[in-house]
Image (spheres, rainbow, N blue to C red):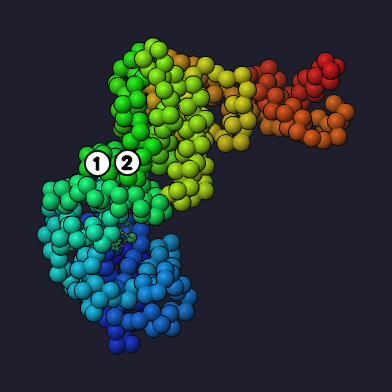
């Protein structure tokens, strides 16, 4: 058995020895039945928080009273102890979101299933626990969770009455008011599964604009039919996401595909009939920074997604004269891989003309190889010595220009770098 479950069962025994009840609940029970990896374990218990904290002094209280829980680490798996919400385990289970999340298992393997989770789990059905409208009224984010579970639990479908409850027109405004952090958590999880299905369910129930108005805004944004025979900017995004999902499980690339064209909503049509989207990658990066902040995404993920959106035109646009070597130097080969996967899907979701992508791929690989082989040919001190400078931003600019020359294959040794610096000095 999975080691963390074994440890959790020992902890249940410790609770029982003190005269309390305890059981595994929620996702861990569901995933045990489905044979999925356990990412976190929840234990519901009749013991109050003080008792849990005295039994496990290393446990950290989280949340605000009266909804405080105690968090303990079991290897890499977090285990959360929650005192019963209600008077008993059955009460506690009745308050959970979906039937398949409302099952418990005792230390000796007895399944506690007052809400019919087992039946739904067998059919791979996602269904709100009890009356769907009530569940959504208590917590509107459950609609987003429903779509997230549909996107991540293999072969699960949503019960029709649960889906139709999400079409309630009042729900939109309620979800809009929910903390962005909770939405961001569900989106992050959905990115690991069928993110396209997640998008389709949000869109199909009319709730997309409540969590991602930026994407809703792409509907009806006309594009050059030569470059985008597929249709408007929203359809393009949907198609690009679908392709990226097939190409990579990487959540950062998937998120970048979802958000790569968000800035297109801000462009107005020209006389020709469709807008010119010049600079939409820079504007998009600013919007994506805001979205990832709203969603409280971890810094590293937010930064990667933002940079991928910022540079998403690189794989298929005319190669820029400056700026690229620095990106490649600081972000490295892995970032480039991600960018070109995104770019590939972006092209295929539009014109399908891959030749510029191929040419830029060759350029980018050559630049990467050259920069990695060369390392730093000269350092800042040497630049200052040769140019007679004492400091300032000019040093960084010169080093960047040098990297550009290295990336183009014009300079590859320290001697060539010094000769190039002398040439610059003598020009001024
Ligand atoms: P995963 O860990 O993959 O996200 P999970 O089912 O463990 O799946 P969590 O968000 O960790 O999901 O929540 C743990 C359990 O707590 C759920 O299985 C469910 O029983 C309950 N739960 C979580 N969020 C809600 C909610 N908004 N409303 C009601 N019950 C919830
Ligand atoms: Mg969980």
Q: Residue at x 18, y 71 (%)?
A: 112
Q: Nearer the viewer, residue 378 or 195?
A: 195
Q: Position of residue 201 (x, y in %)?
A: 24, 42
Disc 1 designates what residue? Answer: 206
Disc 2 designates what residue? Answer: 209
Q: Nearer the viewer, residue 219 or 78?
A: 219
Q: Position of residue 99 (x, y in %)?
A: 18, 61
User: Is 264 drawn above or below residue 318 in the view shown?
Assistant: below
Say which element carries label 1: loop
Q: Residue at x 47, y 37 (%)?
A: 287
Q: Position of residue 51 (x, y in %)?
A: 39, 83
| Measured Cα–Cα span from mark 2 to mark 1 | 7 Å
Q: Quadrant of residue 224?
A: top left
**Quadrant where the N terminus lies?**
bottom left
Whether residues under marks 2 and 1 lie with C-beta atoms below 8 angstroms apart, the answer is yes
Q: Would you say the beta carbon of the disc 2 residue lies within 8 angstroms of ligand 1?
A: no
Q: Nearer the viewer, residue 221 or 94?
A: 221
Neighbour class for label 1 at 10 Å: few (<14), some, many (≥20)?
some
Image quarter for ligand 1: bottom left
Q: Quadrant of residue 423?
A: top right
Residue 200 shown left or right of residue 58 in the figure: left
Q: Is residue 354 visible?
A: no
Q: Residue at x 24, y 65 (%)?
A: 96
Residue 160 shown left or right of residue 401 in the figure: left
User: Is 366 drawn above or below residue 101 in the view shown?
Assistant: above
Say which element carries label 2: helix
**Quadrant where the C terminus lies?**
top right
User: Is 287 drawn above or below residue 74 in the view shown?
Assistant: above
Neighbour class for label 2 at 10 Å: few (<14), some, many (≥20)?
some
Q: Position of residue 347 (x, y in %)?
A: 39, 22
Q: Residue at x 22, y 47 (%)?
A: 169
């Amino acid at each position: 058995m999975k080691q963390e479950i074994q440890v959790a069962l020992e902890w249940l025994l410790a609770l029982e020895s003190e005269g309390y009840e305890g059981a595994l609940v929620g996702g861990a029970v569901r995933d045990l039945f489905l044979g999925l990896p356990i990412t976190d374990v929840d234990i519901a218990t009749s013991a109050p928080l003080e008792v849990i904290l005295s039994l496990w002094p290393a446990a950290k209280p989280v949340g605000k009273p009266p909804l405080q829980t105690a968090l303990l680490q079991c290897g890499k798996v977090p285990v959360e102890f929650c005192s019963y919400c209600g008077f008993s385990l059955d009460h506690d289970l009745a308050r959970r979101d979906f039937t398949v999340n409302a099952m418990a298992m005792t230390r000796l393997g007895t399944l506690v299933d007052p809400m019919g989770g087992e039946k739904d789990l067998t059919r791979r059905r996602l269904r709100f626990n009890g009356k769907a409208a009530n569940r959504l009224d208590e917590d509107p984010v459950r609609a987003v969770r429903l779509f997230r579970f549909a996107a991540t639990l293999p072969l699960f479908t949503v019960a029709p009455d649960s889906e139709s409850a999400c079409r309630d027109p009042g729900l939109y405004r309620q979800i809009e008011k929910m903390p962005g952090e909770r939405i961001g958590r569900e989106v992050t999880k959905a990115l690991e599964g069928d993110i396209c299905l997640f998008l389709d369910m949000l869109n199909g129930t009319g709730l997309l604009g409540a969590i991602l108005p930026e994407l809703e805004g792409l509907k009806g944004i006309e594009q050059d039919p030569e470059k985008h025979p597929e249709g408007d900017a929203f359809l393009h995004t949907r198609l690009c996401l679908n392709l990226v999902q097939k190409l990579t499980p990487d959540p950062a690339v998937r998120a970048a595909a979802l958000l790569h064209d968000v800035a297109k909503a801000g462009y107005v049509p020209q006389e020709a009939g469709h807008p010119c989207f010049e600079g939409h990658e820079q504007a998009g990066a600013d919007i994506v920074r805001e979205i990832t902040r709203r969603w409280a995404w971890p810094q590293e993920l937010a930064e990667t997604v933002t940079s991928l959106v910022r540079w998403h035109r690189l794989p298929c646009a005319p190669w820029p004269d400056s700026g690229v070597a620095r990106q490649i130097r600081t972000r490295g080969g892995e970032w480039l891989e991600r960018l070109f996967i995104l770019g590939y899907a972006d092209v295929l979701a539009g014109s399908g003309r891959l030749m510029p992508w191929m040419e830029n791929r060759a350029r980018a690989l050559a630049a990467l190889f050259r920069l990695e082989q060369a390392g730093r040919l000269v350092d800042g001190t040497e630049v200052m010595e040769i140019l007679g400078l004492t400091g300032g931003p000019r040093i960084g600019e010169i080093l960047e220009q040098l990297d550009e020359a290295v990336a183009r294959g014009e300079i590859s040794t320290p001697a060539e770098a010094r000769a190039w610096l002398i040439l610059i000095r003598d020009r001024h």
